[in-house]
Image (cartoon, coloured by chain):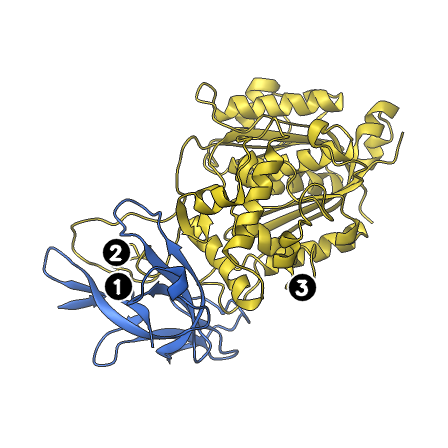
Chain colours: A blue, B yellow
């Protein structure tokens, strides 16, 4: 049994991210909105976000709360359809010389934990293409 | 046109650690210092605004009144992340402009002790996964879906600038911290007053690349206060009081307008640019007119991008700006000659008042060893994530 880490990650044969898109201006949001933060319109439709994108910015985090494994690479990815997503870079060394701004990345999922009932939480990250 | 507002008196405690005092003691010391500095008393005040973040529900303003004088005037307790102090100032400014007060006291205070890393949540070891919160998360996402930690968030803001502009990298960010640590050696009110080489800055423990420990502001305790007066009451003050007063020629508070990436990575740029532009228009000055700038260097990466956001350098030219030494105290536009948040310290609620104290002190020619000679116009900037940005431009009185 698996459960997504967050509700905007859709699991299944093709795991992907789902955003709420404003039907007026096209602004996309993860999570619910009462009205569009861009134009104030009140209707949204669910859209699938592109799995591929480029690395917009990153930081290699060495210092975090005690239970969080470090170092890890935090990143903002700009997907090919123009949506910014925050996640970790995965399958990459946490070394600034190995990480290039603008590099191509692709969404991937992995099991991030198992609860007391044996249910697996599935997270997503972006890996170099 | 709204009436002019003046800083009549100002004071700040040294920033640092005060295990034997509480926030009320610190705020009261700053308040009494500012009243004395302005040659007035609490009975002259028509209102009091008090900013603090971590004790926002403590009725801090009223607690201060118990220490310095319960005159029954209205108190506004304000909280606006790292822009809390600037918000306290603006509360008094707006009251004077609205005609509800002639004179008021703005206080910013914070007692943080050794809080350590701000933001970023721990994970529980064992539980049963159930979606909760706005994103239906089954566990805290910090460290899985990127970072919530402040050194990391501001690192990303800096690296985004590096992505968009040439000549910006780890070394340019580190040079910012080298400068601010060097500047702080002249400021007896700074929490740290120690110089470090560029190699020491770059070699100190990495917190969140590219921010090393020496590129991050500390937590700490402290308070600052300003007595503000409107021009009608100002005209009745003594020549001595008028001569030391400093004019607030711009006071602006903005929030972050929508940008596509804003929900993922706080946009600290657009609201700063908007605030700066509005402030320059209000004051009728440009960045080239500034004798000094105190800006919000919570992390070295933040200071560098604000060179550009405040128009201190050519668009895209922040890397070159620090490389050629322009923001050093003997450069084109001295930035953070107090030592900045990185070395002077950042007791959050106090910061936005303390930077106005710093600029005021230079414009009065009373900054001692760290005085910027001939200073006549200065800018104070703060930004609080969430986000809010406060910009104040101050001018020497010209009255002698």
Local packing at callout 3 (Cα closer than 10 Å; few below 14, some 14-19, many 20+) is few
Where residue B285 sits in the image (x, y, percent)? 80, 52
Label count reads 3
- Earlier-in-chain disc, 2 versus 3: 2
Identify the residue shown where x is 63% and y is 48%: B390
Q: What residue did someone put label 3 on?
A: B315
Judging from the image, mark 1 belongs to the subunit labelled: A
B242 left or right, relative to B210: right
Q: Position of residue A103 (x, y in %)?
A: 42, 73
Marks 2 and 3: which is nearer the front?
3
Circles 2, 1 touching at the beta carbon (< 8 Å): yes
- Camera-side residue of B130 and B306: B306
Which of the labelled discs sits on residue B336, or is there none? Answer: none
Label 2 CA crowd tier, 10 Å (few <14, some 14–19, many 20+):
many
CA separation, marks 2 and 1? 7 Å
Give x and y (percent) for residue A108: 28, 73
Q: Which residue is labeled 1 in the image? A: A5
Residue B266 visible in the snapshot: no
Res B85 visible: yes
- Farthest residue to the left: give it: A117
Q: Could you tell me how far apart the alpha carbons at marks 3 and 1 are, in whole angstroms? A: 40 Å
Q: Quadrant of the C terminus of chain B?
A: top right
Q: Chain of mark 2?
A: B
Question: Dot 1, how many residues are within 10 Å of its Cα: few (below 14), some (14-19), or many (20+)?
Answer: many
**Mark 3 secondary-structure assignment:** loop
Q: Is residue B83 above or below residue B269?
A: above
Q: Tell me: residue B194, above or below residue B204.
A: above
Q: Which residue is mark 2?
A: B139
Q: Are marks 2 and 1 on the same chain?
A: no
Label 2 sits on a secondary structure element that is loop
B223 lies above or below B247 = above
Mark 3–mark 1 contact, CB under 8 Å?
Answer: no
């Amino acid at each position: 049994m698996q459960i997504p880490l967050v509700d905007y990650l859709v699991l299944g044969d093709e795991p992907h991210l789902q955003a709420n898109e404003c039907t007026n201006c096209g602004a996309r949001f993860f999570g619910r909105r009462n009205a569009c933060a861009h134009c104030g319109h009140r209707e949204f439709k669910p859209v699938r976000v592109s799995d591929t994108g480029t690395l917009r910015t990153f930081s290699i985090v060495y210092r975090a709360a005690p239970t969080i494994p470090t170092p890890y690479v935090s990143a903002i990815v700009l997907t090919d359809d123009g949506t910014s997503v925050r996640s970790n870079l995965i399958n990459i060394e946490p070394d600034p010389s190995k990480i290039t701004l603008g590099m191509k990345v692709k969404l991937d999922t992995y099991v991030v934990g198992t609860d007391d009932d044996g249910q697996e939480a599935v997270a997503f990250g972006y890996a170099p293409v | 046109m709204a009436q002019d507002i003046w800083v009549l008196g100002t004071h700040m405690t040294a920033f640092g650690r005060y295990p034997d005092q509480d926030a009320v003691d610190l705020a009261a010391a700053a308040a009494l210092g500012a009243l004395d500095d302005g040659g007035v008393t609490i009975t002259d005040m028509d209102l009091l605004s008090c900013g603090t973040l971590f004790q926002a529900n403590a009725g801090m303003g009223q607690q201060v009144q118990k220490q310095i004088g319960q005159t029954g005037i209205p108190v506004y307790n304000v909280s606006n992340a790292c822009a809390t102090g600037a918000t306290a100032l603006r509360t008094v400014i707006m009251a004077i402009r609205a005609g509800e007060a002639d004179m008021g006291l703005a206080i910013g205070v914070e007692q943080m002790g050794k809080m350590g890393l701000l933001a970023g949540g721990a994970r529980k070891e064992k539980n049963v996964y159930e979606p909760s919160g706005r994103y239906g998360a089954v566990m805290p996402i910090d460290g899985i879906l990127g970072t919530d930690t402040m050194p990391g968030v501001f690192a990303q803001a800096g690296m985004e600038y590096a992505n968009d502009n040439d000549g910006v990298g780890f070394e340019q960010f580190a040079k910012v911290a080298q400068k601010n640590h060097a500047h702080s050696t002249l400021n007896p009110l700074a929490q740290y007053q120690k110089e470090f080489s560029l190699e020491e800055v770059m070699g100190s423990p990495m917190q969140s690349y590219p921010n090393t420990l020496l590129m991050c502001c500390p937590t700490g305790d402290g308070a600052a206060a300003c007595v503000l007066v409107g021009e009608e009451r100002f005209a009745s003050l003594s020549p001595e009081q008028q001569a030391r007063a400093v004019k607030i020629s711009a006071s602006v508070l903005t929030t972050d307008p929508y940008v596509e990436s804003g929900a993922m990575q706080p946009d600290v740029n657009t609201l700063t640019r908007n605030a700066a532009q509005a402030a320059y228009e209000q004051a009728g000055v440009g960045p080239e007119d500034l004798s000094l700038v105190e800006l919000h260097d919570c992390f070295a990466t933040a200071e560098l991008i604000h060179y550009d956001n405040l128009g201190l350098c050519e668009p895209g030219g922040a890397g070159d700006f620090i490389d050629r030494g322009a923001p050093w105290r003997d450069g084109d536009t001295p930035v953070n000659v107090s030592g900045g948040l990185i070395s002077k310290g950042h007791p959050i609620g106090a910061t936005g008042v303390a930077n106005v104290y710093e600029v005021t002190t230079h414009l009065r020619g009373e900054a001692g060893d760290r005085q910027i000679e001939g200073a006549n116009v200065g800018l104070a900037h703060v930004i609080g994530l969430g986000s809010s940005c406060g910009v104040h431009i101050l001018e020497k009185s010209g009255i002698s």
